[in-house]
């Protein structure tokens, strides 16, 4: 027994994906992620909000914090209620991250979709600002 046992279509799709997923594809999505994170950090700077965005390869994570997030303990300090509000606000803007505000780019994603993310992130931060001012003024710089 198994999830993909006796499923030749899934196996064929998996093999084709592995053939396409080469060093060039990895370099492309890593570069795209680096660009997306830079632009999202610019949004944070423009809004003067204490938000940190970390990334490694094609993965990125958003935290509510004035200080750089370099460890699990620092990441755990990000207020969960604010994370949930940002998650839902982004979802309303058509952006689906993990509820812990983790995102990942994949090979079909291009610059246009990254721009959509940055625009939605900008809108979400703008919408959350009154909540941050009322409940987390320490995050307003």
Image (cartoon, rainbow, N blue to C red):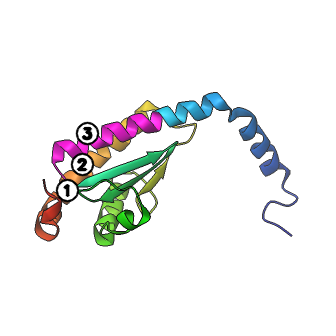
Residue 140's image quarter? Answer: bottom left
Q: Position of residue 139 (x, y in %)?
A: 18, 60
Earlier residue among tags 3 and 2:
3
Q: Is residue 34 shown in magenta?
A: yes
44 displayed left or right of 109: left
Residue 42's image quarter? Answer: top left
Q: CA distance from mark 1 to mark 2?
A: 6 Å
Numbered circles on residues, count: 3
From the viewer's side, name the closer residue of 74 and 97: 74
Q: Position of residue 18 (x, y in %)?
A: 74, 39
State the predominant SS element of the stretch in magenta.
Answer: helix
Residues shaded magenta:
32-49
Give residue 127's mark.
Answer: 1
Label 3 environment density (alpha carbons within 10 Å; few <14, some 14–19, many ≥20): some
Which quarter of the rendered picture does the N terminus lie within?
bottom right
- Which residue is identified by label 2? 123
Label 1 environment density (alpha carbons within 10 Å; few <14, some 14–19, many ≥20): few
Residue extending farthest to the top is 24
- Which residue is identified by label 3? 42
């Amino acid at each position: 027994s198994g999830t993909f046992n006796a499923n030749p279509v899934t196996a064929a799709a998996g093999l084709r994906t592995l053939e396409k997923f080469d060093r060039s594809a990895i370099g492309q999505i890593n570069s795209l992620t680096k660009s997306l994170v830079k632009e999202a950090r610019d949004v944070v700077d423009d809004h003067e909000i204490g938000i940190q965005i970390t990334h490694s390869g094609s993965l990125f994570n958003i935290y509510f914090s004035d200080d750089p997030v370099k460890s699990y303990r620092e990441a755990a300090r990000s207020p969960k209620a604010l994370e949930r509000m940002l998650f839902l606000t982004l979802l309303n803007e058509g952006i689906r991250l993990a509820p812990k505000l983790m995102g990942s780019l994949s090979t079909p994603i291009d610059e246009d979709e990254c721009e959509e993310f940055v625009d939605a992130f900008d809108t979400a931060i703008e919408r959350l600002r009154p909540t941050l001012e009322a409940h987390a003024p320490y995050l307003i710089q």
